[in-house]
Image (cartoon, coloured by chain):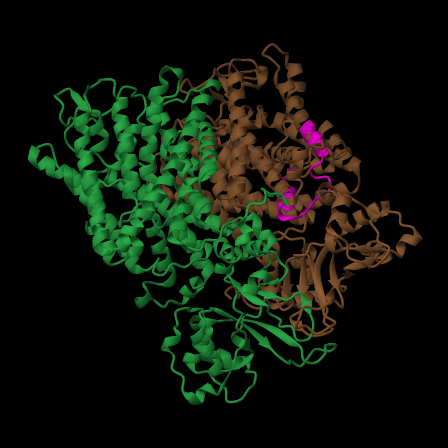
Chain colours: A green, B brown
Amino acid sequence: MVATVLCVCFAPTAAGPGIPEIKAYLNGVDTPNMFGATTLVVKVCGFQIERYHFTFITSNSHELQFAQKIIGSIGAVSAGLDLGKEGPLVHIGSCIASLLGQGGPDNYRVKWCWLRYFNNDRDRRDLITCGASSGVCAAFRAPVGGVLFALEEVATWWRSALLWRTFFSTAVVVVVLRAFVEYCKSGNCGLFGQGGLILFDVSDVTVKYHVVDILPVAVIGVIGGLLGSLYNHLLHKVLRVYNLINEKGKLHKILLSLSVSLFTSACLYGLPFLASCRPCDSSFPESPCPTTGRVGNFKQFNCPNGYYNDLATILFTTNDDAVRNVFSTNTPTEFHIFSLIIFFALYCILGLFTFGIAVPSGLFLPIILMGSAYGRMLGIAMGSYTNIDQGLYAVLGAASLMAGSMRMTVSLCVIFLELTNNLLLLPITMLVLLIAKTVGDCINPSIYEIILDLKGLPFLDAHPEPWMRNITVGDLADVKPPAVNLRGVETVGRIVDVLQNTTHNGFPVIDEEVVPPIGLATGATELHGLVLRAHLILVLKKKWFLQERRRTEDWEVREKFTWVELAERWWNIEEVAVTKDEMEMYVDLHPLTNTTPYTVVESMSVAKAMVLFRQVGLRHMLIVPKYQAAGVSPVVGILTRQDLRAHNILSVFPHLAKPNGSEKGH
Amino acid sequence: MVATVLCVCFAPTAAGPGIPEIKAYLNGVDTPNMFGATTLVVKVCGFQIERYHFTFITSNSHELQFAQKIIGSIGAVSAGLDLGKEGPLVHIGSCIASLLGQGGPDNYRVKWCWLRYFNNDRDRRDLITCGASSGVCAAFRAPVGGVLFALEEVATWWRSALLWRTFFSTAVVVVVLRAFVEYCKSGNCGLFGQGGLILFDVSDVTVKYHVVDILPVAVIGVIGGLLGSLYNHLLHKVLRVYNLINEKGKLHKILLSLSVSLFTSACLYGLPFLASCRPCDSSFPESPCPTTGRVGNFKQFNCPNGYYNDLATILFTTNDDAVRNVFSTNTPTEFHIFSLIIFFALYCILGLFTFGIAVPSGLFLPIILMGSAYGRMLGIAMGSYTNIDQGLYAVLGAASLMAGSMRMTVSLCVIFLELTNNLLLLPITMLVLLIAKTVGDCINPSIYEIILDLKGLPFLDAHPEPWMRNITVGDLADVKPPAVNLRGVETVGRIVDVLQNTTHNGFPVIDEEVVPPIGLATGATELHGLVLRAHLILVLKKKWFLQERRRTEDWEVREKFTWVELAERWWNIEEVAVTKDEMEMYVDLHPLTNTTPYTVVESMSVAKAMVLFRQVGLRHMLIVPKYQAAGVSPVVGILTRQDLRAHNILSVFPHLAKPNGSEKGH
């Protein structure tokens, strides 16, 4: 509840996994306050409270009375919501990276000289990518998996330098993690000293499989793909309902979280009563059986001595330990299939209803929980048909559900390799991932795309739609309001007018009646470039006005504007006051103009324009005419990200959408 | 020698690793005959002969006499040149992919309908990338490493779809490999049944390290980086000398290969006499000691019974087994440091002098051999200072030298993980790789960049040079011969003239005096697009001429030209015969013109134009004027890859190169 209140009242952007927003940011969409200090604090706090609460409650020792146990268990499971930590950690990593890059929170920035090297879009994007990969690395102790996750799922643009930068950041994370693991092994960290560098180690089992095992592996993949896309579909519906509830106000948000929390508690505590007691088996590799306290795998719960409750074993523990239990190898009799079915059904429901509530939440762990139960169930069902251990089935099941829902391949493969440390499992893991992804892709888009779409973020896909080849950028420009052009030396009045009456962020600068180069007729017009709104406002703020219409000298500009000011984007036209006299004065826009904007000819197809826009990472693209003649404006229009979104184009040109065969070729 | 003769006489492109050429192809540079059938056959044959030869010789059994042994050993080591198989395998993979994509060798193509889907640049590139990753996967049995190698080192453009396509191809490779391994375990494959899915398994040793071990790890990295860049530097010199020798003719090439081969033989056979005999130790984990035949690690050579020659152990074996021996863990006394020094020195010399000879050759294994010896030497030198096993030192040494020479990070990390199956080694491997790469990058470019540069391939780097921001594409166009423009409906005579007198591959098509849209002055000119040389020749070949100057209809074009013909690029102007009467006729170029070429305004900086050129993967880029007036041509010039190469620009504008501070910012 504290986590919810924090999220609702202080930083709504801290809710959810944050990965879709980071993905959109790296695609060029800036969500306001996404990487601010408040978001970071709330994310960390909310996250820590969830975890702290849990640690506190589970620290009940053997001696506690039954009554206390009930309350404690309710508390424990109330904090033990079906949420992962990797989404929040990715977001936390990105927040830290962003704050470091800009020298601190907006209001208390350190103005170090070297920080200016990060004050540009590309380096900010790089930093945020590094943060995201560090987050995955910290969550799964999977350094290479983190790099690949950032590459495959998060980043839009990729270059070789970014690859080793993310690799470097995850290397630092893993070395620090390793140092802490070593330090904590000597018992200095209290309850936190558990776990090595490999979270779910299944390397103790030798993988024996033959050609006939291809069949069950394919079955895991196909069912995993189906289940994953079904999960995506249902989660989409649930999130739409939640959006309606959340719009009603803060109280509704808090109540929603609270009810999900209570429901989780009730289920986790109540359901183990349904399971029957199982006798302890001396062949189990570890820990005493049964146990009653925090430590140990085989929870006694309501069973007599010498027996354990298998459902309580996986419900009365941290999510990590639950996964570790379901993955456990060489324990074919540990779980009854009935308990696994209950576990699977419960986590399907929780996974659907928990994700959308207003707390920091990740998707990986819920899906791994579901998938591992499904895999182990399948392993038990296969029975003697297969040689593969049930624990490995659980691993494969988890992998298949992840691939079916998130549609990643290489990064999931490496993450699972690093989680389970079983290299011989690699070939079948690869097959399962590919099959599940292919099956899922036939049915619906990946979960992150669904969330991006729900949030309405203008994400630009890598592939233009096929119909985009049948429309030119000239057609798009025709239906837009005409571009607002400025002259090279413009009056202050016109600039103020343009800034107040439009919301454009870029304006073409055109010189009319230029002194023509030799060989040109007089009366030529020249496209000088593109000037940004932020720079226009800066000019007005600094009152860099000229009495007469003239070009300025270089030194005048350098004297007036610093590098840092020009990199800022936070000015607002409302803050500017211009007197009536000043309105008559002039501004020379030439020195502030970007003289080399990317352009397309008006006959360019939208598909190709979009490839250019996305590949080069643009904000504005000028359209130049294909005709050369006196009286033609050198700029036909200006395109932004919103103009190139399929949805927006279709709303103006609905006839394009009609399916005229799958002409995917050329 | 057979391998050399094959390479020299039939397919010179089969020599060397092939990776730089593949890298250049994926960057947009087509090396003629690089992916042809002859190249494939020679590569496979040369490769197979090397291997077959070797297998034949090493199959000497225990009963052979000493005289035979000498001859056999000479033969064995003559084939056992210091070359890796991964470069050739990468090239073989790409050749197969390319041939599959085009339906067979050039002269005997299968004309299947579905093959046309691959007959475009992008899909060919994708196929070749998949082939390259499969090659690495087959060489190292490292599926994920193969994908990452293709991503980090080979590919220029990357998209999400390509990621899972390469992943799919390596998954198939690893499943097939796994099936063969299983089949061969039952002894069906004769001599080929050795080795599991993990080539150099060092997972049997538990990695124990503490904070103090950071120091030796850093030392490995720094020295590895230095050695790697030193190797790059020396190899550059050797290759330049070899280039001079190779220019003198085929005989010189063959003699060069032969002398390197003989030198290798002499060293491999002679040097073990320098090593002293070491007593067999019963604590060694495997195999009888000493052994005399093909099998077994501890070669007796010239030693009495109960003793083995440690240098012979690593020289009288396949390269793979040598690496496996040097990587062997828990054997601190197996090698004397003196033997390792000889081994290291020998392989440094061989590594430098073998690579450039005219046989298919890879760089990975020679560097791993050098690096492992260096690492193990360092491990012995560290003595009791460190807890890390000597075998792991050898692994780290190999990794550091690879990173120091090839400058890859993530892919090497995963390849080493998959080669050695020791996940706990990951953090220090990452550190070593990063340190070695950083040290190397400070000194010289990576080995592949050096080879690309030596071969004179016009590779476009990801980063434009800083001085490219100070020159515009207009400046470049001014110093070039003016672009040759065609009119929309052009005479046959002019087309023939243009094709014969220029070597351009693209011509702008401009309509003059078009009927202007409303609002334009008469006499407007229109940029219609770009027509390719191949299409012009096709028109001439098919004699698609018009009696009068008119526009054609869609159906006329569709009747005359098929999709497949237009995708071909192999026509030649010399094959075309046009009569004098036909010279007076007309051709309507409109339907054959690409109406949406990418364009830049003449004021665009070369740096930004180059980013566009590379990111979108262009061959031609039109320059449009920034002025709008009557009489201005709608095309100022046309840029190709060669125009954008730093070297070529500097030869025209030498003043740009002068260093005016490291203005790396904006």
Residue A662 position in % (x across, y down): 58, 42
Which residue is painted at 69% across and 37% down in the image? B35
- The residue nearer to you, when weighing B188 against B286, is B188
Q: Relative to B174, does residue A619 appear above or below in the rendering?
A: below
Give the residue at the far top of this rendering: B63
The answer to whether residue A240 is seen in the rendering is: yes
Q: Relative to B346, does residue A15 appear above or below in the rendering?
A: below
Residue B562 position in % (x across, y down): 74, 42
Lateral position of residue B308 relative to residue A224, left or right: right
- The residue nearer to you, when weighing A447 against B144, is A447
Which residue is painted at 26% across and 41% down in the image? A183
Give the residue at the far right of this rendering: B580
Which residue is painted at 34% across and 32% down in the image? A371
Q: Which residues are magenta?
A: B17-46
Lateral position of residue B153 relative to residue A393, left or right: right
In the rendered image, which quarter contains the N terminus of chain B? Answer: top right
